[in-house]
Every structure is written in structure tokens, then in C-alpha cells.
Amino acid sequence: MTGGEYTGLGDWTPEALGEPGQVRPVVTAPSQVLGQAGAEVDPTDREVVRLAADLIATMRVSPGCVGLAAPQVGVGAQVFAVDVTGHPKAVTVHGTFVLCNATIVEASRTRPGREGCMSVPDLTGDVKRASRLVVAGFLPGTGAPVRLVTDGFEARALQHEIDHCSGLLFLDRVAGAHAVYQRKVYQ
Amino acid sequence: MNELAITVIGQDRPGIVADVAEVLARVGANLTDSTMTRLRGHFAMTLVCTGPTAAEAEAALAPLAEDGPLLTTVRVVGGESASTATGEPYLMAVHGADRLGIVAAVTRVLAEAGGNVTDLTTRLTGPLYVLVAEVDLPPGTADDLSRRLTEVATGLGVVVTLRRADSDLL
């Protein structure tokens, strides 16, 4: 694992990956890969950098999508992209970023919320998540260790993506037997 | 493909779901959608399944009803029903002192506005009556409907809230 002290994202942007990224098809449940824990990766590996760029590219072409994890594009790896910029529920916003081998360091103030997922297109569910969160992980490319302190919607998005990297869907965390709903389709 | 709607209700005890699911599996019934819950000590199951004929399902369930504890019904239903929700999802909550006609009054208001109830639960605990419903509303009707619901609720002496049940795509 890469050494060094954990810091914030600094001036990291997706351009630092040096890859435009290609849009990949999104895998949906019950695909096997969504139920398996992703492997730890070497964040400096060329393939991982390419994957990071592809996750961002795929996230950007998907309307309403604020996060995408490697298993969702069929890759069993602990890599995910998040960007909650402009979301009405977001308070703290770190812009677009990708983390490798991310782990939750601190979580508190659990709040309920209804989540949908591109990999479970027909259902939504009520899920309790921490609204205060500290996450540690590594940036693709440099492998720099980062520690993010966030809250609210960005915290929810991070927990959802870290779950994907562990082979868990929101369906594994719904608040009760009547907490899964048919997704409403409306204009 | 046969599609059946089955209901089972009886005094709650451990093993009802296992018993019912087992006899249905034995006749090749594939449970698709179902909802099961305990209401005042009675276990109630409503399920839709595909596979057997109604007669086969009835015959399979019959032994469970023989001792008298479970009441079952089986009926053939049409194929894939249109679940094309085009409305906006809302959550309606009502609470207050129990009295006759709360469900009738608030759901009538919803129906008159073109709202469709997709899920509804009520609970009575002591004097407190609670109703929670998921409803699809025609776009743009929520504000007027909320005012109308408040009027009706005030008349009933209960409190009603209507809020958007949007889910976030993660």
C-alpha cells in the first residue's frame, strides 16, 4: 500500500488521470459481480487509472447519477467515482473524485433516506445511513492517500458506493420488510 | 401461464409462511409478488404466483385449512397487470384519535384528485390511529390536494401530512 499521510483531495481533478475515459455498459442485478466483494487494487496501476476514467465518463452520461462503482461496470474492484455537485440535498461537496480501496473511518448521525440505484433500475428502498462520515482511500494515478470528511448527501453517496465495492446493494440494507418499492417512472 | 392471486389468513403461529410456501412449491407455484404481515395476532398473506391451475393450488392448500386455523382463497387473475405509474410519488401520513371513517374520508379525497393508493397500512394502538400510505398523484395536484386533505382532516380531528417520496439515484 502507498505510504504517506492522509490529506484532502487537494487540487485533484479527473484531468489528472490523463485519460478521457470511455462509457461502459452498466451491469444490473442479479448479475454475480454485484454480489461479490471487489478486490483491492494498486491505485497506480494503468488499468486502474483507465477504470477510474471510465467510471467518471459513464457517470457523466447517466442522468441523475451521482456515483458509480467498479462492480457496476462489471469489474470486481474497490474503485468508485462520486460527484454530488449541484444536488439539492448536498451540503459538503468535494466535486468529482475517484477513490480506490476506500474504507469508512468514522460514521455517525444515522438518517433514513430513499435510495435508487442504476444497477437495480426497478426498485427503490428506505435505507439508514450515517450523515457524518470520514472516509480514507487512495487516489488513482498518484496513489496519494486521502481522508475525506463529509456529511449529508455526499456521505450517503460514499456509503452506497463503498457498499458496492463490498458486494452489497441497498437491498441488503433496507429498513424493513415494507421498505422496498416499485420505482416510480414519471416525467 | 396461469397467474393466481392467493390469500391466506389465520391466527399467527410460527411456520405459516413455510407451510404455505412449501405446499405451493410442491405444485410448481412460483411466488412472484407477495406481502405478508401480522394484524392484531392474525397472520395475513396476499400473494401472486404463476404455474399451477387454481384447482391444483386449492387442492395443495386444502390440508392447511382442514384443521380450521387458516382460511385460504385462490383466484385466477389476468396476466401482467399494468403497473405503469405515471404520477408523482407521495407519502401521506394521518394520525389522531380513532373514529369511524378516517380511511374512507382521506382516500376519497385522494381518489377525487386522481390519486392512486399503491400501499397503505393502518395501526390502532390504544386510542391512537395511524395511517401511512404511498400514493401516486397526477403532476401538479399536490398543493391543492394537501389543502383539501387538511380541511377533511380538521373535520375529523386528525392530522394529515403529504410529502414527496422522491428517491435519490446513487
Image: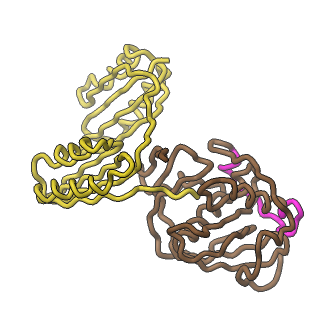
Chain colours: A brown, B yellow
Q: Where does residue B75 sit, x and y in percent of width and height? A: 34, 21
| Left-right relation of B70 to A122 | left
Which quadrant does the C terminus of chain B fall into?
bottom right
Is A139 in the magenta? no
| Image vertical order of residue B81 relative to residue B41, above or below | above
| Left-right relation of A135 to B76 | right
Q: Residue at x 51, y 57 (%)?
A: A115
Q: Residue at x 50, y 21 (%)?
A: B28
Q: Where does residue A32 sit, x and y in percent of width and height? A: 69, 44
Q: Residue at x 36, y 16 (%)?
A: B59
Q: Nearer the viewer, residue A124 or B145?
A: B145
Q: Where does residue A131 sit, x and y in percent of width and height? A: 51, 73
Quarter location, residue B158: bottom left
Q: Where does residue B89 sit, x and y in percent of width and height? A: 40, 50
Residue that protrudes farthest toward the right in the picture: A46
| Left-right relation of A40 to A64 | right
| Left-right relation of B32 to B152 | right
* First to last magenta residue range: A32-49
Q: How many marks?
A: 0
Q: Nearer the viewer, residue B42 or B116?
A: B116
Q: Residue at x 80, y 54 (%)?
A: A22
Quarter location, residue A90: bottom right
Is A35 in the magenta? yes
